[in-house]
Amino acid sequence: MNKGKIFPVAYGVISAIISFIAVFFICMRSFRLNLQLSIALAGVFALFFYVISYFRGHASVEIKRIVYKYQLTDQELAQITGLKASDFPIYHDQLQLILPKRYWPRILDALQKYEQEHEDVN
């Protein structure tokens, strides 16, 4: 398996484990809930954080894949996404996603449209 498929899953699992432990102990110690309810609530939160983290990891991998595939510069990324070039620093030929994660779906959507347009041309 390649890194692009493993990273989102590993990122999601780690996030889920951390959130499960945190919520479990908060429920048990702070709210003094019983064991079954604490486990159930921790499981729900773990699932929620897994899904969020998986999609964040997937978005990160996809954005970087498209950038590397088309060798996009910060100026080209700014033009495609409508953001500033300084939002896309590239150090040592690696894109640094410094933008808040809430912008990633918008960036990914713009880059997927860009990729689709370039695949239609070929």
Image: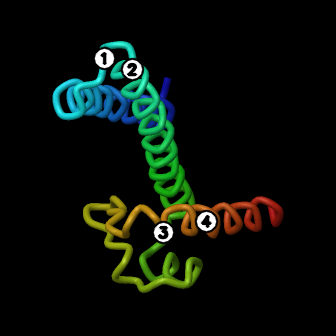
Label 1 packing within 10 angstroms: few (<14), some (14-19), many (20+): few
Mark in the foreground, 3 or 1: 1
Q: In the rendered image of this protein, does residue 36 appear above or below residue 31?
A: above
> Which circle marks residue 37 in the picture?
2
Residue behind mark 1: 34
Could you tell me which secondary element the residue under label 3 belongs to?
Answer: helix
Q: Residue drawn at (26%, 61%), measured in percent from left and top? A: 92
The mark nearer the N terminus, 4 or 2, is: 2
Residue behind mark 3: 103
Q: Residue drawn at (44%, 34%), measured in percent from left and top? A: 50
Amino acid under disc 4: Leu
Amino acid under disc 3: Tyr
Amino acid under disc 1: Asn
Give the Cα distance between marks 4 and 2. 43 Å
The mark nearer the N terminus, 3 or 1, is: 1
> Which circle marks residue 111 in the picture?
4
Mark in the foreground, 3 or 4: 3
The mark nearer the N terminus, 3 or 2, is: 2
Could you tell me which secondary element the residue under label 4 belongs to?
Answer: helix
